[in-house]
Amino acid sequence: MLPSGVLAAASRRPIATAIAGTAALGTACLAYGAGYEVRAFTLRRVTVPVLPPGQRPLRVLQVSDLHMTPDQARKKAWVRSLAALEPDLVVDTGDNLAHPESVPHVLDALGPLLERPGLFVFGSNDYYSPKLKNPAKYLWERRSKPMPRPIDLPHGELRDALSAAGWEYLGNARTRLKLDGRVLDVVGVDDPHVNRDRYNAVSGPADPAVDLSVGVVHAPYRRVLDAMTADGHQLLIAGHTHGGQLRVPGLGALVTNCDLDRSRARGLSRYPSWRNPSAPWLHVSAGLGTSPFFPIRFCCRPEATLLTLVARDA
C-alpha cells in the first residue's frame, strides 16, 4: 500500500494540471485578443427595414469609438478606406479621442468621409483623457455620473473642424436633413454616461411628414432611448459599449458599461422589445477602439457598420 503522502500528491496532480491548463488557455486568449483581434478591423453590413414603402435604399455608415492615439496608422488607413463605400450619410457616435494630440489624426482618418454628409455626437472620451483603472470596475458600473475632474481633451477643436467640413453636431440638438431626395428629422444628445444629456431641451414628437426620424446618442442609456422612443423616432443609433469588448462564446457580452441589457451590446434590435413590430430599430456599434490602458478584444472585433436602410412592409 502506498504511503498516504504519495496518495495525497497523486490526488492533487489532476487539480494542478487543470489549473495550469486553464492558465495557459487564458494566456493564449489574451495574446490572441491583444496581438491580433484588437487590430482585426471589420465592416459589418446590416439591413434595416425602416423607410416608407416604395422608397429606394439609403446607405448610412456608422463610425464609433475610435479612441484614437497618434501612433495608430493602421486604424487610420482602414477608416480612410471606408470612403470607397460611398455612403449617403456618415454618423459618428463619439469617443473619437484618447490623447491630447489626437485631433489631427482623427481628421486624417475621417478625411475622405468628410466629403460626405455627416452627423456627430461626442462621448466622455472626447472630453476626458483615459486613466489607468481596474478593468473589473466595468463589471459592476451601470449608472452614469459626472466626471470628478476638469475636461482635458480638445473636443472644441474637433467639433469646430468637423463642423467646418460640413458635418452637423448633435450634442443636445435637433436638425432637419435633406438627403438623396428624402427629409430626415434627426435629434441627438451629448453623452449620458457623464450626465451631459439634455434631451428635454430638444424633445418633441417626431415629424410624421418626414421620410425618417432618427435619434443619435453615444452611450445608450435607457432614459434617453425611452424618451426618443416615446417621441416616435424610428431609428436609434448608439456606440459606447464596445460590444462588451470581451465576449464569451455562447454567452456574449458580460457588460455594456451602461444600463442597456447585455443582449443589445452590439448589433440591431427592436427597442425595447422584438415582440413589438412598431418599436424603433436600435443599432449599437461595437466600435473601433479601446482604452489605451486595456488594448484587447476577444470574440468582438473592432468594427464600423454600413446600415442599408430599406423600405418597410406597407
Image (cartoon, rainbow, N blue to C red):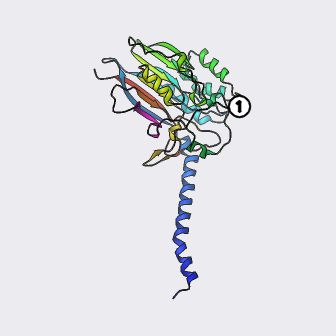
Amino acid type, residue under disc 1 in the picture: Arg
Q: Residues within 10 Å of mark 1 (few under 14, many from 20)?
A: few
Q: Tell me where residue 55 appears, x and y as whole percent.
A: 33, 17
Considering every residue shown, the one lying at the far left of the view is 314
272 sits to left or right of 151: left
Residue ID at (55%, 78%): 8
Assess whether residue 270 is covered by the magenta stretch: yes
Q: What residue is disc 1 on?
A: 149
Residue ID at (46%, 36%): 266
Q: Tell me where residue 298 appears, x and y as whole percent.
A: 52, 46
Note whether residue 85 is visible. Answer: no
Q: Tell me where residue 167 appears, x and y as whole percent.
A: 55, 17
**Which of these two is toward me, 6 or 98?**
6
**Which of these two is toward me, 144 or 301?**
144
Report helix, strand or loop for mark 1: loop
Note whether residue 6 is visible. Answer: yes
Considering every residue shown, the one lying at the far bottom of the view is 1
User: Which corner quadrant of the image does residue 64 belong to?
Assistant: top right
Residue ID at (55%, 47%): 33
Q: How many marks?
A: 1
Using the image, determine if residue 235 lies above or below residue 39. above
User: Which corner quadrant of the image does residue 143 belong to?
Assistant: top right
Which segment is the magenta one?
A: 260-275
Q: Tell me where residue 226 appears, x and y as whole percent.
A: 46, 26
Quarter of the C terminus within the rendering: top left
Using the image, determine if residue 36 lies above or below residue 196. below
**Which of these two is toward me, 294 or 59?**
294
